[in-house]
Image (cartoon, rainbow, N blue to C red):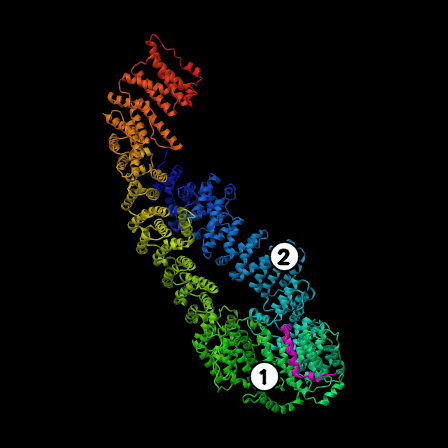
Amino acid sequence: MKLPIEAIFDIYMNEEQQKNAYVKNFSKLFFEMAFDHATKDQKQQFLPKLVKLLGEKQDEQLDMIFRCIARIIQEMKMPKVKDERGNEMHDNDENAIRETYAFFAEQEEKVEKALLEYFKDVIMFQIQAQEQDQANPRMWRTKRRLKGIKESITKEELLPIQINIVTLLTTKGLIDEQKIVTHMVAATCHSERSIQIAAENKLRSIHMDLESPITIREIYDFYKGNAGRHPIEQEKRKLMGFLVQSKEATQQLDNVMIVLKDTLFQEYATTTMQRLGFDFFQWNMQVGFESNGAGKELFLEANFKFQRIIKAYEQHQHNLFSDDQKEHYLLTMALIAKRFPELVKHQYQYIQDYYTALAQEPEKPMQMVIQQALSQLIYAYFPLSNDIQQSLYHLFQHILQHQRKHTNLALAALKGMNRLFPFHHLPSTFLTLTMIDHPAQQIREEAERGLSLKKEAHYQHTLVGHEEHHLPSFDQLVDYMNKETTKTPLNAICMTRLLQFIKMVMKEDEISIANLTKMSLEAYMHLIQQCYRENATGDSLLEANKAYLQVLIDHRHDDLVHSWMRESLPAIFKVRYRGHPLSRTAHGQLIAILFIELNLPELWKTIWEPLVDDLQTHLSPTRVKFSALVSLGTIIALSPTMEPPFLPIMDKTMRLLDHHDTHDELYEAASLVIGSFGMFNGFYKLEKLNESQFKVIQEEATKKIDINLLNRTKIMHMIKKKLKRSSTSDKLKEHIILSLGQMTMADDLNKHFFDEVLDVLFSMANLKASEVLFSIGEALASLCGGTQYCSLYTSDQLFQYETKHKHRDSIVAEQEEQDQMLDEAFAVATEGPEVQASHFRDDYLKMVLQRLVQKGVLSGKKIVRQSTGIWLLAVVNYCGSMPALQPFLSEIQSAFSILLTDTNEVTQEIASKGLSTVYSLGSDDVKKNLMDSLVTSLSKKNKNISKIKKEEDSELLLFPSGSDMQTKNKNVPGTYKELISCATDIGQPQMIYQLLNVSQHNALWNAKKAAAFSVLSISNDSLGDQRHLKAVLPKLIPKLYRYQYDPNPLISDSMGRLWSSLVDNTQATVKQYTPQIMKELLRGISSSLWRVRQSSIDALASCFTGRIYEELADYVVEAHESLFCLCDDHKDTVRAAATRALQKVGEFSIKSCNPTYTPSSRVEEALNQLIPLYLHKGVVFPFEPIIHFSIKQLYGISKASKSLITPHVSDIVGTLLEQMSSLEPRMLSYAQVRNQFSQSDIESIRLSLSKSGPVEDTISLLGRFVNEEVMETLVPRLKEILNIGVGLPTRCGTARFLGDLGKFNKKALKKFTPSLLPVMLQSLQASNSPAERKTLALAIPYVLKCSTFKRGKALVQSILDMYTNERTTDEDHYYAGLLIRSISKHVLALIRRLYDQVVPIIFIARHDPIKKVADIWNDVLNDTMTTSLRETSRQHLLPISKTCSDLLNHQEWRMKKQGAEGINEIATLLSLELDSTVRKQLIDTILTNLSGQIWKGKEVLLMALANLCKMHPKNTLSDWEPLIKTLFRECQRKGPLIYTSNAYQAFSHLLHTDYVHLSSSLASTIQHHLLDLLAKERESEKIVFTDQQKLNLLSSQQQLKTYQIHALGGCFPKPQLDETFMNQLCSLLIGFLSSSHSVYEARAFLSASSYFLDYHILHSLKLSASQLSSFYDALLFCLNPSHSSELIRLDAMVIFQTKLLKLIDSFNASSSHPLSIPNVEQLQVLLNLEPIHRLRDK
């Protein structure tokens, strides 16, 4: 018995009736019983009601409800995506699912929570759990809610439920994604692969809010097993992946500890789980664990594991733990100690344990892990207590002294010592020194860091917390080092570093050797003396020599030093040949000074003679000769008088210079000697020797000396030859040039030598070696400044010694007497203008400057200008203190200004450096004049500063008088103009020089000698007082901010340092000066200089990073517009920078539109700015990357701004839809033009791309914010796009958008459907694109669903007219069917109400000659009809018959044919049930339309007429004559063969109808006509046919003949035939049966024969014996298997048995001469035939 489920449910829902317990239990029990027996559709209808009940019923009633829901879900068949042919594909149709089950999203929170909890329980349910006695109570509840408590659910029953639940949960937009995280995690670990894949894809697409307490609580509950069962490891892994991303997860300490104990501290956990636990621990250490209680609990857990590992190490059983376990536990303990130092800071044992583990660990990767742990652990011990410090020192000392070979252990100890001990802890410093020479590079580098001030800064700032340096005192340092080096001598490398360290300490504490106490000096000297050992290296000797010389300079007259000199000289002399050339040079100079200072006679024998022997001995190594020559030459140069032993040494030196194959190293030493000799007036001493003195020297010399060699002229000749040789290296050239410069520093310089030096130096202007060029500049500076003004050698220790102690006292007076004479002689020799300088060096300076300007600055060669620029810079830099230089500053500035216009960047930078140097040398008045002059000359746009003219009255004449010199360049480079603009804009023109000075980036400044030209800083003096500074900053800050991002790293670094010196807080400063900075940057972006553009772009990107909308609201639009243009800049680096900056600005824009970060009022303001920008400028910008960026931004803003985007939805959607076509790839158009693909393929690709692009995503996202107010402005644009929109993606996108609105936003669309539906249908009809038509056809039903019945009826009628209208095409017919089918799927109720209009069109459209059209209408019939076709035809007979009749009057023959086919089908389907009135109307209609010309398909009318008559009830027509005559007439018409054939077919059908009676005359006429036709073959037209055409014609002719024979068999009048006709017909039939024919013809003749014989039997007529015999022979021929098929034999056998034998028996009964005919059995045996029943079976 079928229970009334709906009535029972009503009782169950009735609250009044439910108060009765009996009724309540009855309804509950019987509803579930009725539900089990309900149909699938009935169950589906109850799903929304059952879901709603979850919020209304009590817990005890929920089990039954959930069981019903489970049965529904189990039987669900999710809609699938269909292809173009309507075939279902594998993927689910999310739109259909979302539409069908939309009620899930509409439930209240209580219902949703209960439903999601149930879904989670079902997903996590395990089949095997129901067999376990100790299953989780929640698992039992789930089983109860699935199938009840008594029965067990099977896998086959559970799996469909789980699959469908996951499908529902993964359907986008159905359920809040944040609430299904744990569901998806459980589903990813399901055994069913399809569930895994769906859940994994969903997890990847979910943007989870991991800071939601609800989400985190669910994850923790799932992990702890509170969600129904304990999770498996795979599920735990996924949950851990979420926990390590959530700050909220770290705040739940109890849960954190549970997870850590289960993973990190669980010894038996898998490696993966331990690793995930360690990651979670690190995450908590970073953002959580704020309470000390957490630290204690963690420490106890970690310490237990840590102690076990340390014990294993101590027992040499480290393999008891895996490497992962050791790594996790060791690092965990260290991190805990760092975070909670109070737990370990008083326990030294922990550090010792780590070093023990490191010492015992054999694997290098684990050693690195332990070192990493140690680096974290040491932070827990600051500040060190005395006990801990002492213990640690002994530990480190033991390791570094006794375990040096253990590299990682020693490195760890050294790192710990450097970080733990302060800089003033001398024992650790000494230990660090001992590691300087370690073979491992890592240890050496760490030791260097330990001796660097950076370590002290790190210790003070990072660890101690302040930046006050606390260095060891000098006295303590040298005392301690003396004691330790006595106990543990240091090698040469360590001693070198020790001396450098002491020097650094002295420099930092500003301690001078001159101020040292006696004890300190003695200790320091003792350390120096230790460097002069036999194993000394070049570096150690160099440092020791420098230190020794400095002591001699500062304490020359000290008795202690004098005593020490005597004691140390032998040891120093003994190692004179060690080291590299630089150290040997310093060593030789030290020996020379000691020789002179001691001035002991015995030294000539112990020092001088060995040195001379070393020099003179031919076989001595080069390094020996080098050292000897330097020592001897320095002694000679520093000696106050020229002693006899000196001349041979000088002679040897000259010969070395003159010899062409002298070794470069010896030549370098000779140059050095000559330079020192000349600088300290050695040549003056030689020239003052009289003849008698020289003879004495000659007599004492062992070798004859040529006095002519000992002069400057000869030396110059030698040097010229050496410099001209191509084999001379650049390094040697440097030494030669420097020696020339030193020779010119002497006070006895003459004019001839001066000219020669200048000629030699200027001849090398074409050189490119930077070091050589700087050396020439130094030589020129030496020449100009001499010893008095040239600052080049002020730091040279030999020069300091000579200057300070004045060994030239004996010649000073004499030299002063000669000064006046030399000046006068020089003036006469020059024959120039009157010399106004007070000293000859002033004249030298002027001459050098003139030559540099005239021959260099104004030269036409680029390389010469560059070289002379370097020289001029060197002269100005090193001779800046000369009073004579001051008058030249203005003209020197002019010279540098000329060089500033050079095309060579190196020359420009030299000029900028020179300008700043010139400015720094002037007085205040001079500086003002220089500044005014420079600003005037450089700031004028059309001023050609390279064109300079000097008149005759010019005093200095650096530029030729009356001349007009100019270089090729006309203007100042833009980079320097920017610097000038920077200074002038801020109102501080004097800053031009400082800014010019920092604008250097060429590799030239990396040269060693270029270090002297350091960057000048902008000090407070140049900016004025602080009050003035504040006024300047608004102008200066923007410039400096941009220059920090200059593409040249040197400029950016320099400006960065300048910025740091001016700005304390960058963020606050930038915020304060944002308007000025943005104005500067936006102006710079449009600069014509690429460097300015690029730096402005990078600065702009930085300015937008981390800012809020309120600060930059006024600049967002302009920044976007500028960057849009620059993304297509001609400079590649500018393009790249603009692209990066645009991304930053885009991120700022999205953040500005997010109400989470920006107030709602500001979000609205931002949207008003940004939406028009991206829509009307970005999307239409003529550069594709900008278009894509703008669309991406629109999507991001739409998503971030949420409902605040609503006012802009209309504009965004309309514009994006209009632009969709312009955004498709150009390759598609190219492929279409080249015909590489068909139009349908191209359209399919275009449509597919438009569906998946960012534009579609944005439009879909905005669909949820559409309301009626938005539609007011949006609908006109949509209609316009549908009417005149350009491009397939645009129109299809619009249709999809409207369809989506109809699916998900019916309320907003409902009001506008009357205007939208006609436009959509009109667009479909007007379109030529199949893809567009299909899209519109699929979208219209969704829009129609929101409309009224009246509008729907009008639309359906319009769609039906698309089929019947005379001007429509086959495509219109197809899409009309597609539209009706879509409407029937989504608005079936409308179709059912309009069945009388729809069914007739469906009925006739099924007969469309185009298969595709017929198929779609057949699908419509199957989708819409609930009954059979016969029943549907009967129910809607009148409209169908009327439509078919009307179509017979249609202008198109195809529609006429379809009408005829419809009538024919009605007659066939309904047969005798056809209403007589309708039948008569149809017959009359057909008869009316049979007249007239024969149109293609007209033959169907004939068959329809025949069927209508054949299936006619008896006696319903009184007169058949008109019908028969009409058909007979049509048979006789000359027309196509097929028409004639069908006419005869219909005619034969009618004649064989039992109740059709023919008159004798009509029968006679028909009989004779048919006999005539059959008696002769039909003649074919004389046309040439192909073989196939012949076959077709033959088949048609045979078919026609068959129909004629059938007609002949039925044209018998009642009650008797004419005897003549009888005889003719008999002869004809016998003749035909006796010959071979086709199966159809033969069977037709047999059928006619059957009618003929039946007629005789019926009317008791007799045939003659001959006729019977002939019939027998004819049938015998038909029965022969060799002539006939089985079908023919079967028909012949039936006739023979049932008809012919009866006639023969009748004849034999009345005749005296009976016929002897065998019976059936005999005939079968005779012909070997099968029995008739077998033939029938076959």
Q: Which amino acid lies under the numbered mark 1 shown in the image of this protein?
A: Gly
Q: Is residue 1078 magenta?
A: no
Q: Is residue 801 visible?
A: no
Q: Which of the two residues, 767 or 532, is positioned nearer the viewer here? A: 767
Tag 1 residue: 785
Do the residues under discs 2 and 1 have CB atoms within 8 angstroms? Answer: no
Could you tell me how far apart the alpha carbons at marks 2 and 1 are, in whole angstroms?
74 Å
Q: Which residues are magenta?
A: 704-732
Q: Which of the two residues, 399 or 1319, is positioned nearer the viewer here? A: 1319
Q: Is residue 769 visible?
A: yes
Rendered image quadrant of residue 436: bottom right
Q: Quadrant of the N terminus?
A: top left
Residue 1283 locus on image (x, y percent): 31, 51
Tag 2 residue: 309
Q: Is residue 725 magenta?
A: yes
| Secondary-structure class at tag 2 | helix
* Image: 736 above or below 286: below
Magenta-drawn stretch, dominant element (helix, strand or loop)? helix
